[in-house]
Image (tube, grey):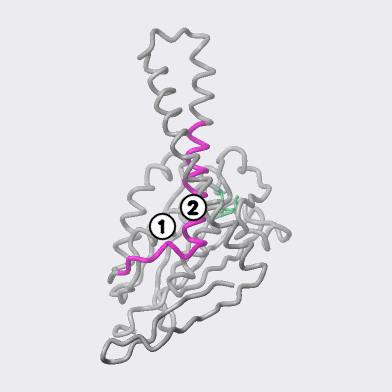
Amino acid sequence: VRSHYADVIASNGEILGGVVVYHDMTREEIADRLKTELMATASHELRTPMTSIRGFVDMLMLGTFGEVSATQREPLRVIKNNVVRLVVLIDELLDMSRVEAGEARLRREELDLAEVLRDVIAVLTSQFREREIELHVDFQEGLPHVVADRQRIEQIAVNLIGNACKYTPRGGTVWIGMHNGNGELRVDVRDTGVGISEEAKSHIFTPFYRADNPLRDEVGGTGLGLSITQRLVELHGGRIWFESEVNAGSTFSFVLPIKPEDA
Ligand code: ADP
């Protein structure tokens, strides 16, 4: 049981008594909270030593402690790659636990979503060029604004557009569309990628789940991106879903409520 206490104070300042509010937590809620706290503490504690290891590996590779021989170079590269993977995993775990704890308090401001998405697309352009994937953007003109957290919206967009690029074979196409649909802003990210099998579909938003597909090992990932993305969309009062067919492609869509005065 979680409890909160407050004094009951009369208008002359005299304390008349107290009120205790008991909040009955189920075993499940308690277990959930412990799990979230454990995850937050563990990932935070892991971050510091990893940062140190990463720093020293970088210095070793740069020859700070003496010349690196040809035979030493390869194992150092492997260590470095794995350290980077761990740092990404720890950062995502930390972010996940913050979002889970509802600690990802949103810093809401009025945003032009088209502008935010264009910025994200600009950053990802080189990734698309590298994989020779054609990118089409089709935004409806004069869209109303949303009240949202810019950094979190960028994170949602990077995850969905990044995935479309990752899970689409070389030479494919990705479309990013946005329009006003029934008082909500709707964003669609469609790709001609590997798609998602029927049996994988129900697990796509589950933390750590990575569906079996021909690109899984090549592109790498933690399987945390979409579960964080889903929670972030929901924290904004929106919804996210997808449609997909194996070897044909996927469309991930989300909606956000339009700023009330503009709706
Ligand atoms: P990951 O780090 O593995 O990319 P995500 O949480 O972003 O993790 O996505 C979970 C899984 O959903 C991916 O591993 C992949 O199997 C599948 N997936 C996500 N986006 C797409 C997409 N556009 N096309 C096909 N599969 C996708």
Using the image, determine if residue 9 lies above or below residue 126.
Answer: below
Amino acid at the residue labelled 1: His
Q: Are marks 1 and 2 in contact (CB under 8 Å)?
A: yes
The segment highlighted magenta reads 83-108
Pointer 1 residue: 136
Main secondary structure of the magenta stretch = helix
SS for callout 2: strand
Residue visible at 28% across and 75% down in the picture: 142
The first of marks 1 and 2 along the sequence is: 1
Q: Is residue 112 magenta?
A: no
Q: Amino acid at mark 2?
A: Thr
Q: Residues within 10 Å of mark 1 (few under 14, many from 20)?
A: few
Residue corresponding to mark 2? 173
Judging depth in this view, the residue of 175 and 254 nearest the camera is 254
- State which quadrant residue 153 falls in: bottom left
Q: Is residue 54 left or right of residue 192?
A: left
Residue 10 located left or right of residue 128: left
Rendered view: 162 above or below 27: above
Q: Identify the mark at residue 209; answer none if there is no mark.
A: none
> How dense is the environment of label 2, judged by Cα within 10 Å: few (below 14), some, or many (20 and up)?
many
Which percent across, then down, holds residue 213?
66, 47
Q: Quadrant of the N terminus?
A: bottom right
At a point 41% along the width and 56% down the height, the residue shown is: 155
Toward which corner of the image does residue 219 lie, by quadrant?
Answer: top right
Seen at 53% across and 45% down, the residue is 42
Camera-side residue of 74 and 43: 43
